């Protein structure tokens, strides 16, 4: 039994003990008073009803009233002497089985009755362990005595309380047993949730299957959702950490190679081995390092600077970029087909300079990696957006090899030949720009062809 079970059983038992003590006290000190109050109240209501009845009817229906209400009714003439009145009433009560050791109607009471007031008395019969609750009322020339015997409840209550103690003890034992069973049903799913939480704290993103139909099941569902989200966040963090490690390794490689060449050629100059080209090589490597640093600074700047979002015509910008690559297209004998038949609204809302950088990167990548000398570009409208797609054949069409093309320094050419692969920062820059534009972008690889796409919101043409 765990701590929660013990705590629940202890508190439930404590509540039961408090309730039992309260019940015992109420029975001991207040039950007899309450019973007497109820008897007085019932007798008062009955005598009020009798007070408004006709005397002849009351005399005729005495026996019926006694049987109906469980009371004793006797009467005598009010004009008799006080002693005779008491004697007559006592005799009549004795005949009806009411024997009183103490009973007396005083002259003061008779005087009140003559003033048409009711008189209420209670006669304690200590030896008989009972009391006789009486109401005297005058109707015409008669004194009516309406009474009810009340047994003293003290002894009975003592026996009842003693019996209740045994009942309470039995109920307490049964309560502890049932509480143990019920709390176990409550605590068991909570234990599962606790174990799942401990597993999550140890990066074991487990789930719990709890079907209780109450708040515990809702808690378990919330725990499962949290586990899924933490697992996704953990995986994303691991990916980011891996990307960071790859970034550090790649930038180290990118810087190490030219620095090694610079050092080697510097030592060659020092040793007198320069054939007149060493300084050119050093200069070229220095330019490569400078270009790499510039692109890194540009990538960082693109992530933080404010973009100038303005309307512009996408069509002339695209043809400007395409014309810029005309010589490379001719030299590489690449055939580019452009389909803009579905383009009706070419005005978009974006940062024109940044979108120019994206188009440059997409087109230059397509020229660099096309494997069949074919590039297909499609520009059209889809809903309220302009959609741009560019597709080309690739030597390796396996989608898994393209998962990280958006990461800095990731290149498909494992030799990292600059003529074939570049620095691997172009698509990272494009991704940053498109993310800042809240653009829907991505790539799709199928049947030896890769397709990049992005969208921009269309706006009204500016006159």
Image: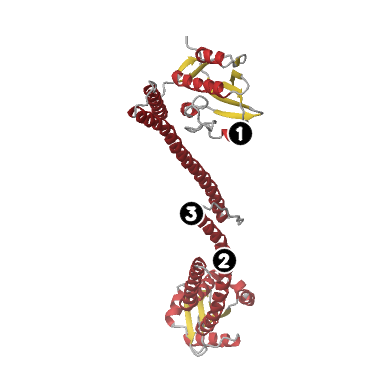
Q: Quadrant of residue 375?
A: top right
- The spot of residue 409 in percent (x, y) is 47, 32
Mark pair 1, 3: CA separation: 34 Å
Secondary structure beneath dot 1 equals helix
Residue found at x 48% / y 80% = 122
Secondary structure beneath dot 3 equals helix
Looking at this view, is 53 or 43 the one in front?
A: 43
Residue placed under numbered mark 2 in the picture: 184
- The spot of residue 332 in percent (x, y) is 57, 17
Lower position in the chain sequence, tag 1 or tag 3: 3
Residue placed under numbered mark 3 in the picture: 201
Between tags 1 and 3, which lies in front? Answer: 1
Mark pair 1, 2: CA separation: 52 Å
Mark pair 2, 3: CA separation: 25 Å
Mark seen at residue 399 = 1
Lower position in the chain sequence, tag 2 or tag 3: 2
Secondary structure beneath dot 2 equals helix
Residue found at x 50% / y 30% = 416
């Amino acid at each position: 039994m765990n701590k929660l079970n013990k705590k629940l059983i202890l508190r439930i038992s404590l509540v039961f003990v408090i309730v039992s003590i309260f019940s015992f006290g109420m029975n001991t000190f207040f039950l007899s008073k309450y019973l007497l109050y109820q008897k007085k109240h019932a007798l008062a209501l009955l005598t009020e009803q009798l007070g408004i009845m006709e005397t002849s009817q009351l005399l005729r229906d005495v026996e019926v009233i006694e049987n109906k209400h469980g009371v004793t009714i006797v009467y005598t003439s009010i004009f008799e002497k006080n002693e005779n009145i008491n004697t007559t009433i006592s005799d009549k009560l004795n005949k009806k089985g009411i024997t009183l050791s103490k009973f007396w109607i005083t002259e003061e009471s008779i005087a009140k009755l003559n003033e048409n007031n009711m008189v209420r008395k209670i006669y304690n019969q200590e030896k008989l362990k009972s009391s006789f609750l009486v109401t005297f009322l005058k109707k015409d020339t008669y004194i009516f005595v309406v009474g009810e015997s009340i047994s003293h409840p003290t002894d009975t209550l003592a026996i009842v309380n003693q019996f209740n103690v045994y009942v309470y003890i039995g109920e307490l034992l049964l309560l502890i047993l049932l509480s143990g069973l019920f709390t176990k049903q409550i605590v068991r799913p909570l234990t599962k949730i606790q174990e799942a939480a401990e597993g999550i704290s140890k990066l074991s993103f487990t789930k719990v299957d709890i079907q209780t139909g109450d708040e515990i099941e809702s808690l378990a569902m919330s725990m499962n959702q949290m586990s899924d989200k933490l697992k996704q966040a953990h995986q994303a963090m691991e990916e980011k950490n891996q990307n960071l490690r790859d970034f550090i390794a790649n930038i180290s490689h990118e810087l190490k190679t030219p620095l090694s060449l610079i050092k080697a050629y510097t030592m060659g100059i020092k040793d007198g081995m320069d054939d007149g080209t060493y300084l050119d090589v050093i200069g070229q490597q220095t330019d490569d390092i400078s270009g790499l640093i510039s692109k890194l600074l540009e990538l960082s700047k693109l992530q933080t600077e404010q973009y100038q979002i303005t309307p512009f015509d996408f069509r002339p910008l695209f043809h400007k970029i395409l014309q810029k690559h005309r010589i490379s297209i001719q030299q590489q004998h690449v055939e580019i087909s452009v389909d803009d038949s579905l383009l009706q609204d070419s005005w978009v809302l974006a940062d024109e300079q940044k979108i120019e950088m994206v188009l440059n990167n997409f087109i230059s990548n397509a020229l660099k990696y096309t494997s069949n000398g074919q590039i297909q570009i499609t520009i059209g409208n889809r809903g309220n957006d302009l959609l741009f797609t560019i597709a080309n054949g690739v030597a390796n069409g396996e989608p898994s090899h393209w998962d990280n093309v958006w990461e800095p320094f990731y290149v498909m050419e494992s030799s990292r030949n600059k003529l074939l692969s570049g620095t691997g920062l172009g698509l990272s820059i494009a991704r940053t720009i498109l993310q800042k534009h809240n653009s829907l972008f991505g790539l799709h690889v199928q049947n030896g062809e890769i397709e990049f796409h992005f969208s921009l919101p269309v706006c009204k043409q500016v006159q």
